[in-house]
């Protein structure tokens, strides 16, 4: 078993909440340039994490819809 020093990626909800907190801190002002840049970088990473979760959800939804279409009868009046 290999050990890594990296923490597991946060869930979508955790990432979104952390991103909201980063935005609140940046909007409140009073930070040094270095602090602002560090928060901005963290916000960018959190946004990428959220996007990965959303892309995964879209892919699962598309696969489920494709599967449903394959299993559906070939009735042209069926809406889905």
Image (tube, rainbow, N blue to C red):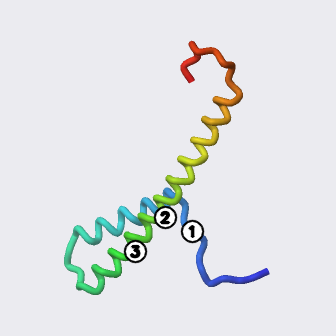
Q: Which mark is residue 17?
A: none
Report the quarter where the N terminus lies.
Answer: bottom right
Quickly name the residue at label 2: 49
Mark 1 touches mark 2? (CB < 8 Å)? yes
Residue 44: % across, % down: 38, 70
Name of the residue lying farthest toward the top = 77
Circle 1 sits in a helix, a strand or a loop, which is it? loop
Residue 12: % across, % down: 51, 58
Give 1 or 78, whichever is nearer the viewer. 78
| Residue drawn at 36 percent across, 66 percent down | 21
Q: Residues within 10 Å of mark 1 (few under 14, many from 20)?
A: few
Quickly name the residue at label 1: 9
Give 71 or 20, whichever is nearer the viewer. 71
Q: CA distance from mark 1 to mark 2?
A: 8 Å
Q: Residues within 10 Å of mark 2 (few under 14, many from 20)?
A: some
Quickly name the residue at label 3: 42
């Amino acid at each position: 078993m290999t050990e890594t020093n990296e923490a597991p990626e946060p869930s979508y909800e955790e990432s979104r909440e952390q991103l909201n907190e980063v935005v609140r801190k940046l909007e409140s002002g009073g930070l040094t340039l270095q602090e602002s840049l560090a928060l901005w970088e963290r916000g960018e990473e959190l946004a990428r994490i959220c996007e990965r979760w959303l892309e995964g959800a879209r892919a699962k939804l598309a696969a489920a819809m494709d599967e449903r279409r394959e299993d559906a009868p070939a009735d042209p009046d069926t809406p889905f």
